[in-house]
Amino acid sequence: MPNELIIFTDGAARGNPGPGGYGAILMWGQSRKELSGGYRHTTNNRMELMAVLEALKALKKPMAATIYSDSSYVVNAIEKGWLQGWLRSNFKGKKNADLWKEYAALAKQHRIRFVWVKGHANNPFNNRCDELATAAADGNNLRVDIGFEQGIND
């Protein structure tokens, strides 16, 4: 679709919880930007969502975007409306509230559609995001996932 940003994302955690990382690719026409980052102690679901957040934070203006993710957790939360219910209940009994609240605020600025893709399959962009995420999880100078480590994500 012309004038639409395409984003691929993936997250990984070694041990779940354990060291984790995210990867994202933002594509607009022939332009491509890769993002990644690692955390010393986190979960896979948090890194899947962090990939989406970091991609959205990289945007300079409101945009239409299609985000491709192999995370059923992330895709279903948005496309099946789970997030709206979690927001209404103030995330009672749900994890990762800190990241979901941040997503909800960022998403208001854009028109976002999510598409689930099979992970570790024949999609070169999803596979590249996985490489970025795992390399970040295995890297040095890992950041602190404050929401996870201080337990404020519950």
Image (tube, grey):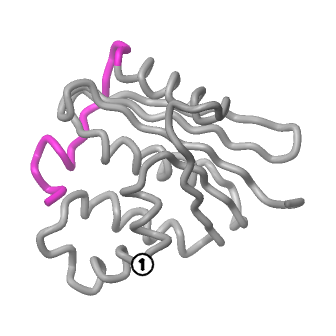
Q: Nearer the viewer, residue 53 or 11?
A: 11
Can you identify the residue that label 1 sits on? Answer: 81
In the displayed structure, would residue 39 be above or below residue 57?
Answer: above
Check disc 1 and give the amino acid type. Gly
Q: Residue at x 76, y 35 (%)?
A: 32
Q: Residue at x 18, y 45 (%)?
A: 148
Horizontally, is 133 left or right of 47 in the view? right
Quarter of the picture containing the C terminus is bottom left
Residue 78 horizontal/vertical position (percent): 46, 69
Task: Give the secondary structure at mark 1.
Answer: loop
Region of the chain picked out in magenta, as a range: 138-154
Q: Residue at x 18, y 56 (%)?
A: 153
Quarter of the picture containing the N terminus is bottom right
In the displayed structure, would residue 77 be above or below residue 128?
Answer: below
Residue 60 horizontal/vertical position (percent): 68, 55
Neighbour tally class for label 1: few under 14, some 14-19, many 20 plus, Cα within 10 Å: few
Horizontally, is 101 left or right of 57 in the view? left
Q: Nearer the viewer, residue 99 or 43?
A: 43
